[in-house]
Image: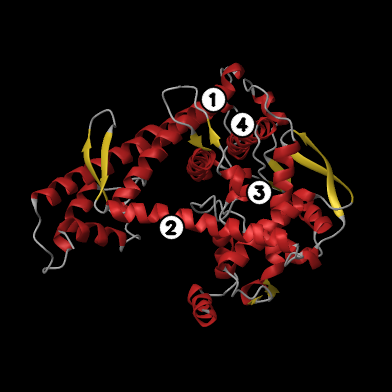
Amino acid sequence: MTYFDAYREYIIHHPEVVEYKPTSKKFDEDALKEVITKLPSDVTPPTQDDIDAMKNFLLASRTLHAIYCDDLYDHIKQILPSFNLPGKEICAYFIGILNRNIHVILNKYNRNLKTSQSQYSTLSDLSEFRLEPDDSNLSALPMRSVMETSTDFTGVILNYLRYYIDKTFDHQEADPNQFAGRVQYVMELANIGYLFKCLYDSALYEGGRIIRLDKKGKALFVYDDEEKQRLIKAGDLLFGNRKMAFYSKLNSLNKPSFFSSYYRTYRIKSCIVENGYIKLSFGQGRNPEMDKVIKEWDVAIQAYYPFLDLKKKLPKLNNVPLEEILIAYGALQYIVYYVVEKGRFENGLYKSEDFDVIPSKIRKRDLVDYIVKLVNVKKGTILQCVNLFEASWQKANNIWANPLYPIDDYELLPFFPIMFTSPYYVMDQILLEGGVPVDTRGKVCEKDM
């Protein structure tokens, strides 16, 4: 282990020290410098490369702190009064932008299908769809990477806005014609900050080094072990190939879903959006889109979690079986997928009124009732599922683990993290929150192997 490796390891193993975190207002560069005085006495002496790596790491930390705390957070604080709205309502506009983006992308994807000879049929295919940039000198961008970045920096904004959730802003001179522009500008600032944070995280957690960083924020970045990065990419490819193999196998066998006993004979018939609120109506019959969502769960379980007992009772969730929480979450995904695909909200955004047709929220009681119509699970269990995935305004949240943001009697509903969070991540979150430790699951896996 090199000196710089030991330096990183110390920071990683002290996550509770906020002074080490550049995205915190309490960040202290001197505290980072003092880490060298706390390293083990038998650590390898620093080479010039180690010294340069630490200097660049400190510079990157200082730059990230400036981007977040001086640029992004301060700009949001300055611009909030011009929204002329309560903080809780401002949050909905950022969710609306995120939801409109995935809707626009899905429309492009569907148009691509009509002109292509390829037959895509899974949500995984959609996640691999590549977007052509406006600049012809740039290569096509994978949809998943674009939307993951957008989702992450939306989470950053919501975490900051939690400090103002109950505050009402009043600025009489605000120009309503600049409303959408202000929302989009904050999103762009968050995007820049988040991209730099990814660079910083790679330097800290993934064996990367920033070997040059100029005053304009341009960085030259390398990995200590390039072979490891190639193996990670190869692993990702094999991971996806195995899932697709099981998808083909399940199609050929035409076996019923693990969750087929929970299906009700209802489908979503229509969706309307009023002031950002989603309202659904239902009709009799099965919907192939629900089957598509549930088949993704079947494939995920067959490919990598065949040892998992879906009837496992979760002690911290009133002994509800795991499969009931999963099918309820699958119904939530179907609702979101339907709204994204069938909705019409690709309109231009200029004033706050333009956001009224963009779905961003749903009454909590409506959401529970809609899921009750779709799956044969008790209403109390469905409510537990919804509560399980709710964020808390009392702390910083992970938008992927808790994508439902409760406000008054409704939930803010960011579509992308609900549709595309890894099913394994969702299952692990349910097991952990349900009182089943990861090591317990690991022992079952080892026994199965």
Distance from disc 1 to disc 3, alpha carbons, whole Å, reads 42 Å
Mark whose residue sits in front, 1 or 2: 2
In the foreground, 34 or 448: 448
The answer to whether any part of residue 149 appears in the image is: yes
Q: CA distance from mark 1 to mark 4?
A: 8 Å
Q: Residues within 10 Å of mark 1 (few under 14, many from 20)?
A: some
Residue nearest the viewer, comparing 424 with 408: 424
Q: Is residue 233 left or right of residue 111?
A: left
Please report contact status of discs 2 and 3: CB closer than 8 Å, yes or no.
no
Say which mark, if any, is on residue 348.
Answer: none
The mark that comes first in sequence, 4 or 2, is 4
Kindly identify the amino acid type of the residue bearing the numbered disc 1: Ser
Q: Amino acid at mark 2?
A: Gly
Tag 4 and tag 3, C-beta contact below 8 Å = no
Residue 383 can be seen, yes or no:
no
C-alpha span from label 1 to label 2: 48 Å
| Mark number displayed over residue 235 | 2
CB of mark 4 within 8 Å of CB of mark 2?
Answer: no
The x, y position of residue 339, in whole percent, is 73, 40
Residue carrying label 1 = 82
Which of pointers 4 and 2 indicates the residue nearer the eye?
Answer: 2
> How much space separates mark 2 and mark 3, taking CA atoms?
21 Å
Kind of residue sitting beneath label 3:
Thr
Q: Which mark is residue 85?
A: 4
Q: Is residue 306 left or right of residue 279?
A: left
Q: What crowding class fits label 3: few (fewer than 14 Cα within 10 Å), some (14-19), or many (20 or more)?
A: some
Residue designated by label 3: 122
- Give the quarter of the image for residue 206: bottom left
In which image quadrant can residue 232 be found?
A: bottom left
Which of the two labelled residues, at mark 1 and mark 3, occupies the earlier sequence position? 1
Which label's residue is closer to the chain start, 4 or 3?
Answer: 4
Q: CA distance from mark 4 to mark 3?
A: 40 Å
